[in-house]
Amino acid sequence: MSTITPGTWARVRLHPDCPGDGRRSHHPAEDGCRVEVTAVDRDGDHSAFALYKGRVESFVGPRPEGGLGTGRYFRPDELEPIPQPW
């Protein structure tokens, strides 16, 4: 059973063999981002939608054209739960 539920704060931990959510590929800049899960109801393996909330460590490297956006779908095993920041 997944511990990823709406309201979970998590750190993105991308798997190198995961191509993305079917709409767009994962980008290395996503790895390590802090996110807040808002929904876990999508069909398929990328069922958890999370909003980007920043990074603890800095990312040195190219960023996706147009930035990361506000959020995206992840596989639950790509999200490592973290304590809430307050």
Image (cartoon, helix red, strand yellow):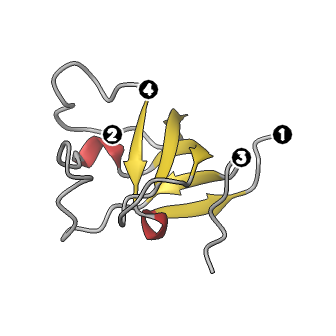
- The three-letter amino acid code for the residue at tag 4 is Thr
Where residue 73 sits: x, y (%)? 39, 47
**Marks 3, 1: nearer the viewer:** 3
> Looking at the rendered structure, which numbered label has been put on residue 59?
2
Where residue 83 sits: x, y (%)? 75, 55
- The three-letter amino acid code for the residue at tag 2 is Phe
**Nearer the N terminus, badge 4 or badge 3?**
3
Residue density around tag 3, few if under 14, some if 14–19, many if 20 or more, within 10 Å: few
CA distance separating discs 3 and 1: 13 Å
CA distance separating discs 4 and 3: 16 Å
Residue density around tag 4, few if under 14, some if 14–19, many if 20 or more, within 10 Å: few
- Above or below residue 15? Residue 11 is above
Residue for point 33% across, 39% down:
59
Secondary structure of the residue carrying numbered label 4: loop
**Nearer the N terminus, badge 4 or badge 1?**
4
Viewer-closest of 60 and 12: 12
Residue farthest along the bottom direction in this orientation: 1
Residue for point 24% across, 48% down:
28
- Quadrant in the rendering for residue 60: top left
Which residue is identified by label 3?
A: 7
Left or right: 75 as drawn, with respect to 40: left
**Marks 2, 1: nearer the viewer:** 1
**Nearer the N terminus, badge 3 or badge 1?**
3
Where residue 68 sits: x, y (%)? 32, 29
